[in-house]
Amino acid sequence: MTKPPIPDALDTYVLNMGPQHPSTHGVLRMKLTLRGEEIVAAEPVIGYSHRAHEKMAENRTYAQFLPNTSRQDYLSGMIYNFAWVEAVEKMAGIQVPERALVARVILAELNRVASHLLWVGAFLLDLGAATPFLYAWDDREAILFLLESVTGSRLTYCTGRFGGLSRDLDADFPRRAREVLAKLKARWDEYEGLIEDNVIFVNRAKGVGVLSRDVCLSYGVTGPTLRGSGVPYDVRKAEPYGAYPRFAFDVVTRTEGDVFARYMVRVLEMRQSVRIIEQALDQLPDGPVLTPDSIGVKKRLKLPAGTQYYAVESARGHYGILLVSEGGTEPYRAKFRTPSYPNLAVLTDVLPGHMVADAVAVLGSVDLVMPEVDR
Amino acid sequence: MSALHALLARLIGDFGATLVLGAGTILGYLTFNVLFLIWLERKVSAHAQRRLGPMEVGFHGSLQTVADMLKLLSKQLVTPLATDHFTFLFAPILIFIPTICLTSLVPLGDARAFAEMPNGLVVVVVLSGITVIAIFMAGWSSNNKYAVLGGMRSVAQVVAYEIPVLLSALSVVLIAQTLDLHEIVSGQHVPYALYEPIAALIFFIGITAETNRAPFDIPEAESELVGGFHTEYTGMRFALFFFAEYTNMLVLGAVGATLFLGGWKGPLAGRWPFLGPVYLLLKAYLVVFLMMWARWTFPRLRFDQLMNFAWKLLIPVALVNLLVTAIVLEALPLR
């Protein structure tokens, strides 16, 4: 992508967007160089919520690190929690009961829908529409209640255990889950009428912030942002993990690569997630959710020496964990490949040439979670 | 009212009596109106979003804005060091003056407005554009980049949207054959909105933009410009901008009601004159309610789209509408 040359300082001025700004979603700071209202250069400044998760992982046992996982991405914490658990299980060779495998898919997909719903609301709030926000949060609340009844927490879940889950889904869970899904499905048409058919929204979103396929691939962009640019890459299909191979679902892609495409990908992805959850609820086997020979939280788990990379599809894209073990109770090194980081980096390329109002739309459309960028 | 006026006229003269009564009535009512409109806005937004809104203070939260006002009054006023002090302090006061002048021009009933003007409509159009100077003063003197951006956007927006407002008002003038607001109403046997639906719609969009209401709230777009032109204002000074917005909504709504909805006219208004102001206010609040409804339904336009909308769509349509009105009036002897 060709960038316009940066003109001399007299022609432009710098606008500091953030770290305290209504639409930087947390503590991102964008250093925008503007000419009038047009963006000449954009530089994301990060690190405001750096908590050294990777260093913390080196200093605690595998089980002690469990609560940290869901705090990297507080909006889809379940997926991150299970990713850590599954990475350790794979390295240690722990078997997981069938019921736990399917239950993990149900919980993770519910969390994905909740995360996308929050995004729909927050994104439209960035565009100045306050009402869809409340509607989306209403739907999300129903899912959070459901997840809370299983895990005991609303956002920072810690329900994965090496060898299963900490708690079982109760007998009533499938019925309540189906109720929530039915309510969600009934809402989609309403969203369509209010948002996708709204000429103001379409004008704000179509043709704005176009990310070409090549730019995405060169930056390592993943998740709905990449799929909005026409690349059908989804870890759940590309490197299937857990119980995902058993369920039928499509990888949603759009070719335009603009803000509207990213919106549509997320909205359609929620429908695919619901499809997965419904199949999983039908197939949910009976039995224990934790292997009897599971090494519990209190006992110290030792992993064999070696290096292993494990990836999952989070609500934001490809989340990878690189574990290096020297055979001890703590990892020698744990590296987290978080999807928001490259998704943020690509903004430097896409923002110049847009207006300030578009910056907000584009920033919202890539769905950033700042603690996950900073880790 | 006329008895009171006569009593006062004996003490301070005819002009003085009109001034005191007019200013008292208008300022008193506008204060009440602001409190009511803020409450209404919260209720409208709440019900659009399947919430209840304020419920605790007073009946259905009706005293909530009074409580908020007391809170705002007790807040510390912060003046940033780098501001242009005089302009910064004067802007929130100045923003009220044109609005109050406007109010005095609107005929409340058959008994004429407080300030009678033979070409009142021209004054209305001029005054409604002046508030932008105060907004720009606020934005510029704050010495804050967000505020300057908000102020600049505001000027461009009001300049662009004044033209369609004027053009749509002109098509009413063509039918009424007068610029006098009082005579426009008395000649209006059927609301002109029925003759001129396109002009009425353009006028509505125009006043929504002139009052900086969503989807045209570009000057204070909170997700882009934090607070826009009032970013640096605190406490009661911020509240004054807030009040001015709501006052403006009502007054421009009343002007719209006068031009297109028959003003103070209504069933039995001829028999009982006190019904005149009631009808006018009901119609004005209907317009205000529509503005609120739009705000809680639509996303915000982008700045360049907003300009395109005014210059490339509204103004040509308003011009064509004006032309068609003129031709039809010439061709058909309607009157």
Image: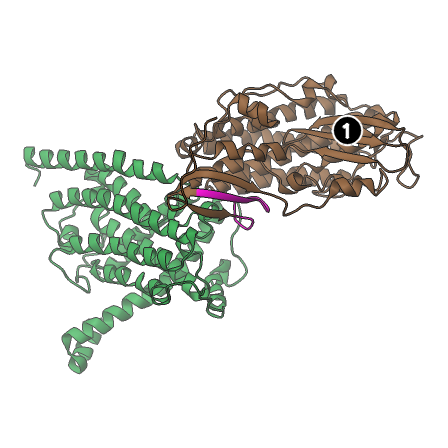
Q: At 22% from the left edge and 59% from the top edge, which residue is drawn?
A: B108
Q: Nearer the viewer, residue B256 or A375?
A: A375
Q: Which chain is home to disc 1?
A: A
Q: Nearer the viewer, residue A199 or B38?
A: A199
Image-based side of A73 in relation to A288, left or right: left
Quick one: label 1, few (<14), some, or many (20+) residues within 10 Å?
many
Q: Quadrant of residue A71?
A: top right
Question: Residue B237: x, y in percent?
Answer: 41, 64
Residue B64 versus residue A355 in the image, above or below: below
Give the colour chain A carries in the figure: brown
| Residue underneath mark 1 | A103
Look at the image and say whether residue A147 sits in the magenta stretch: no
Quarter of the N terminus of chain B within the rendering: bottom left
Q: How is the image coloured?
A: by chain
Q: Note the chain letter of the green one.
A: B
Q: Secondary structure at mark 1?
A: helix
Residue A219 versus residue B55 in the image, above or below: above
Q: How many circles with numbers are drawn on the protein?
A: 1
Q: Which residues are magenta?
A: A18-33
Residue A216 versus residue B32 in the image, above or below: above
Q: At 34% from the left edge and 39% from the top edge, which residue is drawn?
A: B306
Q: Is residue A50 visible?
A: yes
Q: Nearer the viewer, residue A255 or A190?
A: A255
Q: Nearer the viewer, residue A164 or A241?
A: A241
Question: Residue A283: x, y in percent?
Answer: 76, 21
